[in-house]
Amino acid sequence: MRIAIIGTGYVGLPSGVGFAELGNLVTCIDRDVNKIKALNEGKVTLYEDGLEELFHKNVQAGRLKFTNSMQEGIQSADLVIIAVGTPPHPVTHEADLKYIHAAATELADFLNGYTVIATKSTVPVSTGDAIETLIKKKNPKADFDVISLPEFLREGYAVHDFFHPDRIIVGANSQRAKDLIKKLYKSYEGKTNFLFVKRRSSETIKYASNAFLAVKIHYINEMANFCEKAGADITEVAKGMGLDKRIGEKFLNPGPGYGGSCFPKDTMAMSFMAKQNNIKMSLIDATIEGNQKRKEEMARRIMSAVKYINSPKIAVWGLSFKEGTDDCRESPAMQIVQELIEHKADITAFDPKAMDTAKLLIGDRLKYANSALDAASNADVLAILTEWPEFRNIDLQKLSKVMKTKIIVDCRNAIKRADAENYGFSYEGIGL
């Protein structure tokens, strides 16, 4: 099958590589000239575990190519996947569809023969209707169907999730489109759950899923606050809760709040859509407010740990919004760092993968170290903000020797309290 993917970000690029690995001929399209130039030169423009190896394999096999030309990518495609950004509007916080609408309008002129256009971007309900209208207006003779094909790729695990999905949701209103998608995912038959639904239902499913998971994260963070006051241990409480199959163990890790490219914008978009339909979603609204306050609270904890030290030096481990990715969009770590900067803190940070990304966002308002231990050198307090494996496995004896004052504020519970205290650290975790 010939596939065109519009957008080469954290959804488009892993999806393109994945579909090429399945044997399809994939052309990835992006307006960013520099990004396409880099990809054509063999440079993977984002970090995902396992992506680079499959990228080079499929480029060399001739199954994967990149272009700035919409015409080149679209004219021979059986399936066009729209995977561009839907950032929150700066005022209303609704999903901004300008990139979706621009892509739909531009591709319309180049449709050749029957084509399925799939929105993989997370889009508000009825976006498929709008895309359909735009294409028909621009090219009345076009033979096409618009479907919703939401992505469920976790950043940091996108390659794994592409080949081992827990479900494939397809919002299609025609049998012809359904048949093409069945052909696309034929190798997945019997290996995962397929659900064919109305297009508007599919568009709702992604928002409903992400909003629910965000609520779950906010809930466990509130329970962590309770445990700190009541003398309970949130790790034990969460384990006990997770044994209940109705609840499940995932997304019960307390921390500095949710972040990334999905949960923040999707909860805000869900709230906006609810208001448009005169529905009040109090749980989602409370989650959005509580998540913002969570980051402010974490910054206060860090500053409080060194309130008796003049001009304290703060070491920060982790800048990406979670481990396994270099994505710093809406990262709790970055937002906490911003709060610390407002307090005039002297910060040295380290992240295994996200240093370059962080520098683009925050510049030289903090120092960057070459390793975790370098960041902690001569520090008064260590703040752990992202749960990278190397932070969990750090040599605490070496850490104790390089820090000036042995204080750890562990916002991810990455280090065991008993282990830290054995090396003389004053340790503060979350919900312990």
Image (spheres, rainbow, N blue to C red):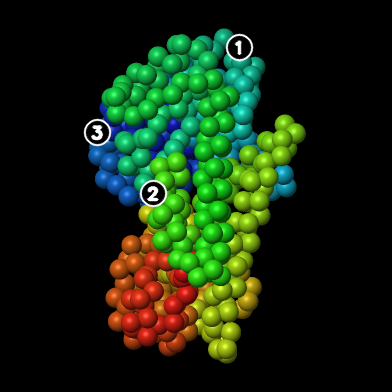
Alpha-carbon neighbours of circle 2 within 10 Å: few (<14), some, or many (≥20)? few
Image coordinates of residue 92 in percent, x first then y, are 72, 44
Q: Amino acid at mark 3?
A: Ala
Instruction: Name the front one of labels 2 and 1.
Output: 2
**What is the C-alpha distance between the residues marked 2 and 1?**
55 Å
Q: Amino acid at mark 2?
A: Leu
Question: Residue shown at 40%/20% (left/top)?
Answer: 181
**What is the C-alpha distance between the residues marked 3 and 1?**
37 Å
Question: Residue shown at 44%/24% (left/top)?
Answer: 195
* Residue beneath disc 1: 140
Image coordinates of residue 366 in percent, x first then y, are 52, 73
Q: Secondary structure at mark 2?
A: loop
User: Which labelled disc corresponds to residue 243?
Assistant: 2
Residue 63 in sight from this viewpoint: no
Q: Is residue 378 above or below residue 129?
A: below
User: Which labelled disc corresponds to residue 61?
Assistant: 3
User: Which labelled disc corresponds to residue 78?
Assistant: none
Q: Nearer the viewer, residue 290 or 137?
A: 290
Q: Secondary structure at mark 1?
A: loop
Q: Are marks 2 and 1 in contact (CB under 8 Å)?
A: no
